[in-house]
Amino acid sequence: MNPAHGHRDYRQPPERKSMHARIVRDLGMRIVGGEFKPGDRLPAEAALLADYDVSRPVLREAVRVLVAKGLVLSRQRAGASVRARNEWHLLDPDVLYWLIQSQPPPQFVEILLTARRVFEPAAAALAARVASDAALKRVAEAYAGMEAARTPEELLEPDLAFHRRIAEATGNDLLAYIGNMLSLALRESIKLSSQHPNTHALSLPRHKAILTALLNRDPLAAQQASLVQLKETKEDLNEVLAGSEGLM
């Protein structure tokens, strides 16, 4: 499932969407945002029923969803309590989205870039070694889409596809899954960096260097090009965030 499109009901449920989805989103945001901390008990069932004005089955189904996402532990008669952060399913699209929304932009950027520095250079190096010609062609097609883009909005989807397809090109299903799940956070990061006035001109040569290394089957060059791209992306994001602070 593409995280950009999946689970949309929890993030932005339409006006007539079930209260179940609204409760999941509200409680999820309050947990991830720190209103309910690890170890805290959620309000008693009677209080939640009154707050949300729903039936007991609806509330319990919402709690079951939060349990499945690793956010809460529910015990009979003891109620639901918030689990430790290291037990949250952070690659779940909803949990990841709530995390993004609850973090100040500089903190979100640092969390994401740290994860990308661990993941992307290694994935690029592996792809350079093992990718099929067809997989590399898909990466090249994503880059061609980036070249063809005329606006930051048009650049977004091929940029996401470029990184996702490198993870897929490793031939490792788990790495491909991680790359796909990171797309949601990466989408928010690219939207932020697109506020830089030279985003297109800066982005293309960085990605071209990665693509060239992949096509040359050069793992070291692919790893280094990915590290450079992330370093310079961080510099761009820092400029955007500094500019935003100056406008406040």
Image (spheres, rainbow, N blue to C red):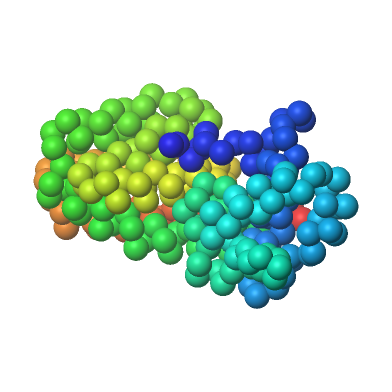
- At which x and y percent is residue 217? 11, 46
| 137 shown above or below 107 | above
Quarter residue 104 falls in: bottom right
Q: Is residue 9 left or right of residue 198?
A: right
Is 150 in front, or is 109?
A: 109
Residue depicted at x 28% and y 28%: 141
How many numbered callouts? 0
**Near-viewer residue (82 or 197):** 82
* Residue at the image position 54 percent from the left and 60 percent from the top: 70
Q: Residue at x 23, y 48 (%)?
A: 172
- Identify the residue at horizontal 63%, vertical 64% (top origin): 74
Q: Residue 208 sits in which quadrant?
A: top left
Q: Residue furthest front?
A: 77
Q: Is residue 31 left or right of residue 228?
A: right
Return the x and y of residue 25 as percentages of the image width and height: 68, 48
Residue sitting nearer the eye, 179 or 35: 35
Q: Position of residue 71 (x, y in %)?
A: 59, 61
Position of residue 83 measured from the top left corner of the image (x, y, whole percent): 59, 69
Looking at the image, can residue 167 be seen?
Answer: no
Whether residue 171 is situated above or below residue 85 in the rendered picture: above
**Left or right of 188 on screen, residue 244:** right
Q: Quadrant of the N terminus?
A: top left
Tell me the quarter of the picture where residue 180 sits: top left
> Is residue 227 at least partly visible in the picture?
yes
Q: Is 120 situated above or below 76?
A: above
Q: Is residue 39 above or below residue 98?
A: below
Report the quarter where the C terminus lies: bottom right
Left/right placement of residue 70 relative to residue 168 reads right
